[in-house]
Image (cartoon, rainbow, N blue to C red):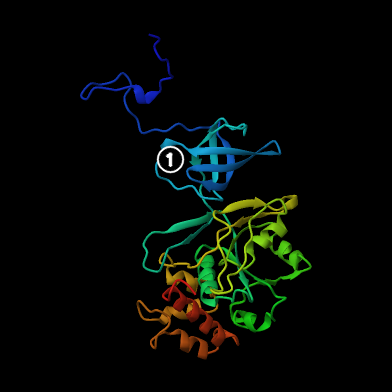
Amino acid sequence: MARSVRDYDESDVRVRPGRRGSRPRTKERPAHREAVPGRVVTVDRGRYTTLVDEDGLPRVVLAMRARELGRKGIVVGDRVALVGDVSGADGSLARIVRVEPRSTVLRRTADDTDPVERVVVANADQLVVVSALADPEPRPRLIDRCLVAAYDADMDPLLVLTKADLTDPAPFLAQYAPLSVPHVVVARRDGGVDGLDAVREALAGRTSVLVGHSGVGKSTLVNALVPAAGRATGVVNDVTGRGRHTSTSAVALALPDDVGWVVDTPGIRSFGLAHVDPERIVHHFPDLEPGTADCPRGCSHDEEECALDAWVEGGNAGAAGPSRLESLRRLLRTRTSAAGD
């Protein structure tokens, strides 16, 4: 009878307990100096689609996590080092052997009591909060939570309001005037997007992650910005007023002419902030932060003993002080309110 032949690897070797092998164990890992740099653009069930750019010729390389990385998480936006077959040919599979240090990390939790942080995206420098002005109705509390997450991650926030053809954006924008959040207003015109040039200008030179609840027109916006993206779009349910989830996973896309990157994420219905230190929120109000020096220990900055009231009444925060203080407290309350709308 013919004997079957197969390739053997290190898992076929067994060493008897108590006997020394010829090669002592070591915790040292290979340096992989020949590894090729890449950027993770999608993640799907343990497979990582990366973009490798060598000699100005970008190519897509599918990869898996190397065993030596253990349980280290890899997310969209990560800059990684790859070895093995990095040709990008059909059927090829490289290995990710290193995740480079992250410049920023956008996190969220399921709710405000969940101790488990979920990394949404790495190495983005701008958080674009997309909200429809109507159909579906805007959800200010969810928007506030996204702003808090942006401040906590040291990312610049940008508010993009869609469907301005359905209603006047001025009343809604008035709520955010004291926060000085940059904004862009877009509308649907003859099958296109009016205001797209302003969005492009705001995204130029940045790595921006787009977040928003379902049905706000996020995928429509991405398709207009990156025509080859082909992101699925949906409609809003007439009964519930909610959109249907059309994007099922995050994907990083290069803007035309290499002017920047956008990361489209699935629609969200909640944004937990259990991981956020309230003091980091205060840090993003430099006109108010010095006034906290006289606050009692453990001050929530939203109580009678808070020193910020006297600081603002003394004119230390300028003419906009009262509205800025109310905006700060609104965000601090957001940190401890319901995670949804």
What residue sits right under mark 1 in the picture? Answer: 69
Using the image, determine if residue 141 lies above or below residue 227.
Answer: below
Report which quarter residue 317 is drawn in: bottom right
* Residue 81 placement, left or right of 72: right
Q: Quadrant of residue 39?
A: top right
Q: Amino acid at mark 1?
A: Leu
Q: Residue at x 38, y 8 (%)?
A: 1
Image label count: 1
Residue at x-position 70% and y-position 72%: 185
Residue nearest the viewer, comparing 52 with 296: 52
Q: Secondary structure at mark 1?
A: helix
Q: x, y (%) of residue 258?
A: 72, 50
Q: Quadrant of residue 195?
A: bottom right
Answer with left or right where residue 134 lies relative to residue 117.
right
Q: Position of residue 146 (x, y in %)?
A: 53, 68
- At 45% from the left and 48% from the top, the residue drawn is 73
Q: Nearer the viewer, residue 297 or 14?
A: 14
Of the pair 39 and 324, the residue shown nearer to us: 39
Q: Residue furthest right?
A: 190
